[in-house]
Image (cartoon, rainbow, N blue to C red):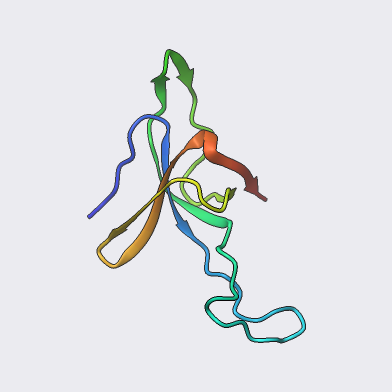
Amino acid sequence: MNIKPLADRVVIKMVEAEETTKSGIILSGSAKEKPQVAEVVAVGPGGVVDGKEIKMELKVGDKVLISKYSGTEVKLEGQEYTILRQADVLAIVL
């Protein structure tokens, strides 16, 4: 099954959180922070949203930073994705 986001939405897949600290301490599941880096897996076409023309600047494969609790989490075929508006992406990681 493929996901095709509508309008100015993007579908992202979170990058796995580190399980050890830089000093080598292994973190338990509850001690890990929710990751903020994700990979874009699908991009909507853009267009007119709320009366404004939206040009999509993200593309599939981009690594992005997002807010900790932004978007809507969905699970399809055993994979977890987040769907959010392009405006909710904070930055592209270069």
Q: Pinpoint residue 29: horizontal percent, then vertical percent.
A: 52, 78
Task: Determine whether 88 is above or below 94 in the image.
Answer: above
Q: Pinpoint residue 54: horizontal percent, then vertical percent.
A: 47, 23
Residue projecting furthest to the left: 1
Task: Determine whether 85 is above or below 49 in the image.
Answer: below
Residue projecting furthest to the top: 51
Q: Is residue 17 left or right of residue 83?
A: right
The residue that appears at 38% across and 56% down in the rendered structure is: 81
Residue projecting furthest to the right: 23
The residue that appears at 50% across and 52% down in the rendered structure is: 61
Q: Pinpoint residue 69: horizontal percent, then vertical percent.
A: 51, 51
Depth check, front residue: 68 or 12: 68
The residue that appears at 50% across and 55% down in the rendered structure is: 39
Q: Is residue 41 left or right of residue 30?
A: left
The residue that appears at 41% across and 27% down in the rendered structure is: 46
Q: Pinpoint residue 8: horizontal percent, then vertical percent.
A: 42, 31
Q: Is residue 58 left or right of residue 25?
A: left
Depth check, front residue: 94 or 11: 11
